[in-house]
Amino acid sequence: MEFNAFLEKCQSEPTVSDFESYLAYCIFEKKSAETSGKDKVTVEMYSFVRDQAFERRDEQAARLLYDLAGVSSWKEGEWEGALR
């Protein structure tokens, strides 16, 4: 998924959605397994940055989430029902 498409999703999706849940999963589950505790993202940090990206439409915050979650490798709709 390209950054512009991700930014549009952040600006149109609620913070409680399959999209946001999958984003959190990728940051906390996938990335923490890959980094083995290095550069660990806290829940507080994630919540703050997520709110900036989703509610305040902050492009820098969205870019940080995009990079942390490895969104560039996501396929369209990958998040739909992924965590059910």
Image (tube, rainbow, N blue to C red):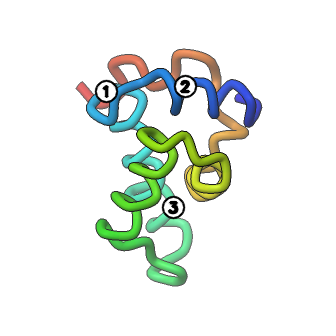
Q: Provide the secondary structure element on which disc 3 rests.
A: helix
Q: Quadrant of residue 5?
A: top right
Residue sitting at x 47%, y 51%: 52
User: Residue 73 appears at what percent x and percent y?
Assistant: 70, 37
Amino acid type of the residue tagged 1 in the rendering:
Ser
Separation of marks 3 and 1 at Cα, in angstroms: 20 Å
Q: Viewer-nearest of labels 3 and 2?
A: 2
- The numbered disc on residue 9 is 2
User: Residue 74 appears at what percent x and percent y?
Assistant: 63, 32
Q: Provide the secondary structure element on which disc 1 rests.
A: loop
Q: Are marks 2 and 1 in contact (CB under 8 Å)?
A: no
Q: Are marks 3 and 1 in contact (CB under 8 Å)?
A: no
Depth check: give the residue in front, 44 or 41: 44
Q: Quadrant of residue 48?
A: bottom left
Q: Which residue is under mark 1?
A: 17
Q: Mark 2, residues whose alpha carbon is within 10 Å: few (<14), some, or many (≥20)? A: some
